[in-house]
Amino acid sequence: MSIRNLIDAVPMPVIEVDAKNRIRSANTAAEQLLGAGRERLRERTLPEWLPPGSPLMLLVDHVRDHGGSVTEYGIDLSMGRTKSDQLVDVYAAPLGENAGDLVLVLQPRAIMDKMNRHLTHRDAVRSVGAMASMLAHEIKNPLSGIRGAAQLLEGSLPEVEKPLSALIRSEVDRIVRLVERFEVFSDGRPLPLSPVNIHEVLDHVMRLAQSGFGRRISFRPDFDPSLPTIAGNRDRLIQVVLNLVKNAAEAIGPDHPEGRILMTTAFRPGVSVMVPSSGRRVSLPFEVCVIDNGPGIPENLMPHLFEPFVTSKATGTGLGLALVAKVVSDHGGVIECERLRGQTVFRMLFPIRKERD
């Protein structure tokens, strides 16, 4: 493999600039980060791709003036393309071939931030699981007795008072349903996994939505047909995607004249997480996205979106997305949400299935 092919295979963005700050080359990851192909990148200098007064140019000047390599953390490369910050850690060093030539290696901070949030979500779900076990034992049994007593009393009550007994039974049933939703979090048994074609899952959810709550919304699939199967539980994956699509449809609302939901799959190398039980890192290159053009999620909720009891709905329980995060985590994956170019993107990353899985 040539050096050029090797650099192109590196999952982190790598950019080479000459003494006049013209971009000589960029690998595939750099193209994705800057949102342009390498031929287009070469048409402009590095400062033209950066926000005015970017600290990255100060770093470049420092390396040229003093020599040696320098690392800077948390440099913003958002350039106004998105509402969210695009923070990166940058390693800059002279190339040594020609005076002033530099190589820049960028590590998007968003990846580490997402991994940290994923761990927080997982811990929060575990806390809910412990509480669910307690609720099931301490609440469901007494509720069963209350419901039975109300049913027995109903036969001896005057007709005018019987609706009160029915109200007691109805409220008890509602509390039991809520507790049962909690019980899902306490199920620590490993999921039964088998090879699953995620595109069949997405197609199935799309048909369900189009025949019901999403009949007024335009659905657009954008799948990579070359992707292999994943090790998953088909029913749970349908539950996850259906939850995300239903949330997207509710966010768009019934009166949006051009409401649309885009469902995509892609291969995205470069993201991995540590498996606590084994101490090994697992690559998560299988990307599944549910994207809608609704008004978006309030900014203050974004960092806590997958935590239990967090919701922007007036009648929501705040358990739906927490359950989604648990199921994705049970599949060895991660989920994140961001607002990008006027769209809300829910992105799930899964490991590729191996034969031993």
Image (spheres, rainbow, N blue to C red):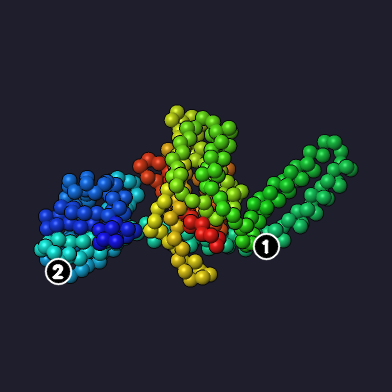
User: Residue at 50% of width from left, 69% of height from top?
Assistant: 276
Q: In the picture shown, does residue 164 fall above or below 116? A: above
Between 187 and 312, the residue placed more toward the observer is 187
79 vs 239, left or right, is: left
* Nearer mark to the viewer, of 1 and 2: 2
Classify 10 Å Cα crowding around label 2: few (below 14), some (14-19), many (20 and above).
few
Classify 10 Å Cα crowding around label 1: few (below 14), some (14-19), many (20 and above).
some
> Which residue is label 1 attached to?
134
Quarter of the image where the N terminus is located:
bottom left
As helix, strand or loop, the secondary structure at mark 1 comes to helix
77 vs 204, left or right, is: left
| Quadrant of the image occupied by residue 136 | bottom right
Point out the residue furthest to the right here.
156
State whether residue 78 appears in this view.
no
| Quadrant of the image occupied by residue 105 | bottom left
Measured Cα–Cα span from mark 1 to mark 2? 62 Å
Between 314 and 86, the residue placed more toward the observer is 86
Quarter of the image where the C terminus is located:
bottom right
Q: Which mark is residue 67?
A: 2
